[in-house]
Amino acid sequence: MELTLSRTIQITGLLLLVAAVTQSIYTALYFTDADVPRQLLWGTEGCLFVLTAAFAGSALVQVNRYHLAWSAITAAAVLNVVQVGVGLTMFGPFFEAAGDIEALTPAARSVVAFSFMVYNAAKVLLAIALIVFGLAKLNTGSRLLGGASTLVGLIALVSNMASMAAGRDVFGDLRLAGSSGVLATVLLAVCLLTLRDGTGEGA
């Protein structure tokens, strides 16, 4: 099978969509106090973003337009791999140690804060990509998808940048940042899956 630009874009969209689904499942299980299979869900998400970085990076060097969006998607995928890696490999050991030695509690919390900083940064990048493609959709007459994408992109951009700048101590968990970021990922995936072509004119 020839891996054309069009197929590369479609695969990137599918990967983003599946990643958003895994994030939604994790969030739903977490807020219902269910037993969360963290290794499975986060591990799967990490694999998806590794692939996303490769495919988005490939598209970046082939497209004729919207390079800002493609570079943002590539960078966001890399940051998401870092964030997932921190969660899977560091959360458990640090909080276990903090349970035995109280003085390590600030260190454990700093690991969580770092993870959220990376998470928010990745969502900012995906929001930028969504705004670019949302405006492109508006220019091609797709008012509903274009308008929704631009609006959600702006909300995700502002809320996640606010979390990065002011920190969780000011805004708390700021669920708007996380939920708008996931919705932005879904809409970004839809934008990619509905591009008119893969020649770069619609990409």
Image (cartoon, rainbow, N blue to C red):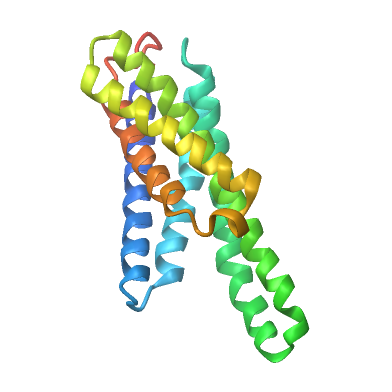
Residue 199 lies, in percent from the top left, at 37, 11
Quadrant in the picture for the N terminus: top left
- Name the outermost residue toward the right: 103
Where is residue 76, by image quadrant? Answer: top right
In the rendering, at what x and y percent does residue 47 appear? 47, 53
In this view, the residue in front, 202 or 174, is: 174
- Measured as percent of width and height from the top left, residue 178 is found at 44, 50
Q: Position of residue 159 (x, y in %)?
A: 49, 41
- Say if 168 sits above or below 99 in the image: above
Q: Vertical placement of 175 versus 15: above or below?
A: below
Image point (56%, 64%), residue name = 87
The residue positioned 78% from the left and 82% from the top of the image is 103
What residue occupies the far bottom of the structure in this picture? Answer: 100
* Left or right: 92, with 195 as reference point: right
Residue 54 visible here: no
**Can residue 87 be spotted in the picture?**
yes
Residue 22 relative to residue 109: left or right: left
Q: Quadrant of residue 113?
A: bottom right
Q: Relative to 40, is 24 above or below?
A: above
Number of numbered discs visible in the structure rendering:
0
Rendered residue at 47%/16% (across/down): 66
The quadrant in which the C terminus is found is: top left
Left or right, residue 135 beside residue 109: left
Q: Residue at x 47, y 10 (%)?
A: 64
Q: Residue furthest front?
A: 170
